Image (cartoon, rainbow, N blue to C red):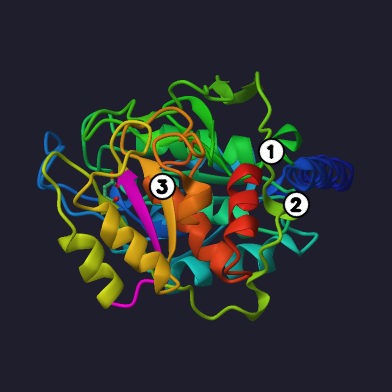
Amino acid sequence: MLFPRSAHAALCGVLFLFAAAVQAQTAKLPNVTILATGGTIAGTGASSTTTVGYTAATVGVQSLIAAVPEITKVANVTGEQVFQIASENISDAQWLQLANRVNVLLAQSSVDGIVITHGTDTLEETAYFLNLVVKSKKPVVVVGSMRPSTALSADGPINLYNAVRLAGTPEAAGRGVLVAMNDQIHAARDVTKANTTTADTFRTTELGMIGYIQGGKPFFYRDVTRKHTVDTEFDLAKLDALPQVDVAYAYANVGDVAVNALVAAGAKGLVHAGVGNGSLPAKTKPALVAARAKGVIVVRASRVGQGIVARNGEANDDQLDFVVADTLSPQKARILLMLALTKTTSTKEIQRMFYTY
Ligand code: SIN
């Protein structure tokens, strides 16, 4: 059947207006890039009830995005597969690769925010590393899941949706790298994985998370006080490797075997995860003193999980020329010490950095 000319013109006009409206709305949406690195959020299990013993890092970034079509209504999303690993295997080289990619993308005016999908096992470490080396105020949100994509009540889709909403929110800018899990917003410096398997595993216990995401909308209640991102002195531009820093863990009746082995293996820095207020067991202390005499930087941290390791408290740090970790966990103290060692070997300067970041 032939349309009368006037009806055809009217239909074209309506279609044109509709297309223009869609285009205008899309143009208003934030541009968020999802950098996928693997983990359980990209994992698959044998059945919908498989929530342990599944395989991490099998689903690609385009499938992750396709599984949550709701995100395309709240952001213009593009995806990149940076690598595809279980996060216990992440390397310094991959951290550098990821951080450099984040910096390149955020320097582009067409990118408003970044979401990084990541395994939860070392998520807090990657988040803190990025918090120290990303050179942009734009939002960077790290997200994972505790249940694989094939599980009943998989938490990956809602976590990814929330992370994209957060990364596209101007209020998320300037707060450092954020972790979005389980409807909560955490600061990279202080969050930790606190339960082996439950969906509420990410916690910033005593210092407190900084906000919630409710109905897809972020709500902030606290600010991050330690310096981060554009306000750090760390510059990746000329770095192609990080110095070797290891962690020695204290426990009842511990000796000096681990410390001596780590020094012999070439550690430039050692974080001692001491008991209590970073105490040094008598059988370990001489090995740490000897390590320092060889030029190894020793940082006293605590395995307790909360609280400040007091300088000159359980050890005379001034005399021993040791550094204290402040409130950083041993695994995060390791990251700051690696970056510090790219700038200096002065313990005075390194201690300043631990009180700054
Ligand atoms: C991983 O960290 O890659 C596996 C565990 C997880 O993502 O929850």
Q: Identify residue for label 1.
A: 175
Q: Is residue 350 visible?
A: yes
Q: Nearer the viewer, mark 1 or mark 2?
A: 2
Q: Nearer the viewer, mark 2 or mark 3?
A: 3
In the rendered view, does 217 fall on the left or right side of 280? right
Asked whether 268 falls inside the magenta stretch, the response is yes
Residue 217 placed where, x, y %? 62, 24
Task: Characterize the local packing of mark 1: few (<14), some (14-19) or many (20 or more) Cα atoms within 10 angstroms.
Answer: many
In the rendering, which numbered label is found on residue 300? 3
Q: Earlier in the sequence, mark 1 or mark 2?
A: 1
The type of residue carrying mark 2 is: Asp
Q: Earlier in the sequence, mark 2 or mark 3?
A: 2
The type of residue carrying mark 1 is: Arg
Task: Characterize the local packing of mark 2: few (<14), some (14-19) or many (20 or more) Cα atoms within 10 angstroms.
Answer: some
> Circle 1 sits in a helix, a strand or a loop, which is it?
loop
Give the alpha-carbon distance from disc 1 to disc 3, as whole Å.
28 Å
> Circle 2 sits in a helix, a strand or a loop, which is it?
helix
Q: Is residue 59 visible?
A: no
Residue at the spot 15% in from the left edge and 53% down from the top edge: 255
Give the quadrant of residue 238.
bottom right
Labels 1 & 3 near each other (Cβ < 8 A): no
In-front residue for pair 157/300: 300
Asked whether 195 falls inside the magenta stretch, the response is no
Vertical order, 236 against 106 (above or below): below
Q: Identify residue for label 2.
A: 231
Residue range (magenta) = 265-273
